[in-house]
Amino acid sequence: AVNLKGRSFLTLMDFTPQEIRYLLDLAHDLKAKKRAGISGDLLRGKNIVLLFEKTSTRTRCSFEVACHDEGGHVTYLESSGSQVGKKESIEDSAKVLGRFYDGIEYRGFDQKTVEDLARYSGVPVWNGLTDIDHPTQILADMLTMEEHMAKPLNKAKVIFCGDIRNNMAYAWMYGCAKMGVHFVAYGPDELEVDPDVLSASRKVAEATGSVIEVSSDPGCLKGADVIYTDVWASMGEEDQIPAKVKMLTPFKVTTELLAATENPDVLFLHCLPAFHDFETKMAKEWKEKGFDIREVTDEVFRSKHSVVFDEAENRMHTIKAIMVATL
Ligand code: CP
Ligand code: NVA
């Protein structure tokens, strides 16, 4: 039987397919329980702390609501409001927070920070996004696929379009490799996927029957079950927008791109937040400077293929599963 008590959740690469399956099953159960109005106490007496060096809506709210739903308590610390990393090293902060809290969530830049927090705190640490990974998002995405697809994960083909070098692309590679999903990173040749990420994923894929591809050829879209995209410039990379717009516009998710899958039931997923119109301050400002930063059209975003709000809700159920399983 799977037992994840005391484990940290830093990357899906640390987990076996059976353990990931267990987390997904637990998330399905916890979602059904919440829908039925059954309140839980699986985190009663637990205190958790959320450290955010980058902004968030879904991830922060998921941890807070999930913890409260199960009777736990939350402290939220944003980078300007604590000593962590500025006046006090990660090692010392981890040792202190480990004395107060039963679990620590961290969102920020370096993967090494989550690793150090886990090493020195002595309590489970959950990765809420780093520059190179976003593992909690993948659980939500897979839960959403299972709710909307007629086939199991290991028969599915996922295409990630656009910035194939970002945290979401890498998190997807790891997740698909582990769960036997056919994955294609569809983006420009100029963006070279980290060879270590690719080889590590492919090594896992050999054992699970997954295929991990990188392609700039629209022919790869055929037969896709999921079209996924993310912003073209991640948090902290806004200076790259002009170059990225030029490079990634051919990979914008449009109705034509969906049609190229030849799958009438293709799903559109996006971790959110998304640029699909000019209603945001950022999209407007870049438009005035002559750059269209939309990675997906409004038509696709609002189409029947789009399950992005189910996906967003599923962040909460899957994050709840991670906390319940590890605490
Ligand atoms: N998808 C996601 O992580 O959203 P937030 O940045 O709002 O947490
Ligand atoms: N790649 C995006 C994901 C946001 C959830 C970023 O890092 O900004």
Image (cartoon, rainbow, N blue to C red):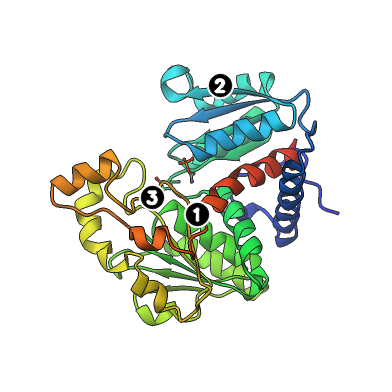
Q: Is residue 70 above or below residue 180?
A: above
Q: Residue at x 52, y 56 (%)?
A: 171
* Amino acid type at mark 1: Val
Where does the image place residue 161, in percent across and percent down from the top left? Answer: 39, 65
Left or right of residue 59: residue 153: right
Which residue appears farthest toward the left when viewing the image?
289
* Amino acid type at mark 3: Ala
Residue identifier under label 1: 308
Q: Earlier in the sequence, mark 1 or mark 2?
A: 2
CA gap, disc 3 and disc 2: 36 Å
Residue identifier under label 2: 92
Mark in front: 3 vs 2: 3
Where does the image place residue 13, in percent across and percent down from the top left? Answer: 61, 56
Please identify the quarter of the rendering in which residue 177 is found: bottom right
Left or right of residue 312: residue 2: right
Contact flag, marks 1 and 3 (Cβ < 8 Å) = yes
Q: Is residue 179 above or below residue 206?
A: above
Quadrant holding the N terminus: bottom right
Where does the image place residue 96, in percent across and percent down from the top left? Answer: 61, 19
Q: Which mark is residue 56?
A: none
Left or right of residue 296: residue 225: right
Residue identifier under label 3: 274
Mark 3 CB within 8 Å of ligand 1: no
Could you tell me if residue 122 is visible in this image? Answer: no
Name the secondary structure under disc 3.
loop
Q: Nearer the viewer, residue 261 or 91?
A: 261
